[in-house]
Every structure is written in C-alpha cells, then in structure tokens.
Amino acid sequence: MKKKVGVLVSGRGSNLQALLDAAADPDYPAEIALVISNIPDVYALQRAATAGVPAVVIPHKDFGSREEFDAAMHMVLEAAGIEIVCLAGFMRLLSPGFAKAWEGRMINIHPSLLPSFKGLHTHQRALEAGVKLHGCTVHLVTAELDDGPILVQAAVPVLKDDTADTLAARVLKQEHKAYPLALKLMAEDKVTVDGNRARVDAPAGGTLINPKS
Ligand code: GRF
C-alpha cells in the first residue's frame, strides 16, 4: 500500500511538482493525496489541479490564532487519511501542538546545509559568509524552525561569480532530487530517530547528493 501524503504549500510549488512527478512512477511508495495552501491562487494549486490531486485552500488570515489555523489543517489532513506531511515552501511557523501531532511523520525542505543558515535569504547569507559549499536539507519537523533530524542533504559548490539567484537555481535543482528521495525513504519506513539523529536504512552515501556543479 502506498503511503498517503499531504503537501503544504504557499507559493510556486516546484518541490510539490518534483514530488508529483516522482509519485507518478507506479513503483514509488507514496501517493500525493492532498495539497493544502494557506494562500489562494498560488501556482502550486494549478500544479495540483493538473496532476488531478485534490487541493484545499485554508487561508491563515481567516483564523484568530496560529493554533486555530493549525487545528483546521490538522482536521483536513486527518479526514483525508494522510500519513505523511511534506512542507514544500510552506511559509508559516507551526504551533507546538501541530508539530507534536505529526512528530516523526512530517518533513520539510530547507535551502541550506543545516544547521547552517536557518530561516530566510539563505543563498544571500551563504554568499556573504563565503562558504564554498552550500545546498539543501530535508529534515523531520520539530516545533523549532528549520530544526529536527536530518534525512537527506544535497551539496552544491559556490562558484566565484554566483549571485543569490544563480546559487538558488543550482540548489533548487538538487532540492528536486533530495525531496523525492527523502519522501521515498520515509514512505518505505527506512527512518528511525535516535535523539537528534535520523538513522536512515539506505546504502552508504544514499542520503547525500553531491553533484560536481
Ligand atoms: C524552496 O527553496 C524550499 O527549499 C523552501 O522554499 C522554496 C519553495 O520553492 N522551503 P517551491 O515553492 O517548492 O518552488
């Protein structure tokens, strides 16, 4: 049985697209069963429609508190029988209660090699810090922003003429490989958590993507 996945989005949804594309393979162990956006009319919703996946808009602005908004999302996810939640460019902080309810079953993609550069503007900050290696991370979600056990990382070199945009584009290409890989490992129950560390039952190097450019 394929695991039922709900994807939370707020924008263009290129990572959603990568997950939809991966899940189109009959051998992929997860099915994208629901998309939730907190913002109406974003491109991610069109991607869901094109793929024939049900999508729901739950505008956070309609709720008096973060907890009420999260409770509404939780109800919709539960009603759809969702087993794994993927945050894919979802631009809301989560309440501790929601994080707890989905602990071990919710993953996020972040455009840096965590624990470096949590938060926003990661590519610009990486350039300013002068790092030579940057990338993206898929991790289990905890109540702390961009924290939680790391599942998969993809590294990209920082090139001497990079701008935040060229670097972002190079990282994004790897995000689209890292996220489907991490979801596959989750859906196949290959992940166990030991303190802050996720132990992934994958071949050596199977959780690191390390392209040359
Ligand atoms: C990605 O860079 C992701 O890592 C970050 O937000 C961006 C979302 O892009 N969390 P998209 O909506 O998936 O195209």
Image: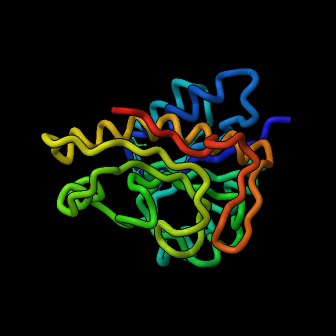
Q: Position of residue 202 (x, y in %)?
A: 72, 43
Q: Is residue 1 left or right of residue 36?
A: right
- In front of the other: 12 or 57: 12
Can you say whether 210 is above or below 89 in the image? above
Report the front residue among 63 and 144: 144
The answer to whether 111 is drawn above or below residue 184 in the figure is below
Give how far across and how far down residue 196 sits, in percent.
64, 72
Q: Viewed as shown, does residue 206 lie left or right of 88?
A: right
Residue 144 in picture, x, y percent from top left: 52, 75
Q: Quadrant of the N terminus?
A: top right
Task: Report the residue at 29% width, 37% height from top.
Answer: 169
Q: How is the image coloured?
A: rainbow
Residue found farthest to the right: 1
Q: Residue at x 27, y 57 (%)?
A: 131
Viewer can see residue 208? yes
40 relative to 104, above or below: above
* Figure quadrant of the C terminus: top left
Residue 175, x across and y down, in percent: 45, 41
Q: Quadrant of residue 119?
A: bottom left
Residue 62 visible? no
Q: Is residue 115 left or right of residue 86?
A: left
Q: Residue furthest front?
A: 204
> Residue at the location (59% across, 71% down)?
142
At 51% across and 39% down in the image, what residue appears? 209
Residue 212 picture quarter: top left
Q: What is the number of callouts on the image?
A: 0
- Relative to the observer, which residue lies in front, 184 or 106? 184
Question: In the current view of this chain or complex, which residue is farthest to the left?
Answer: 161
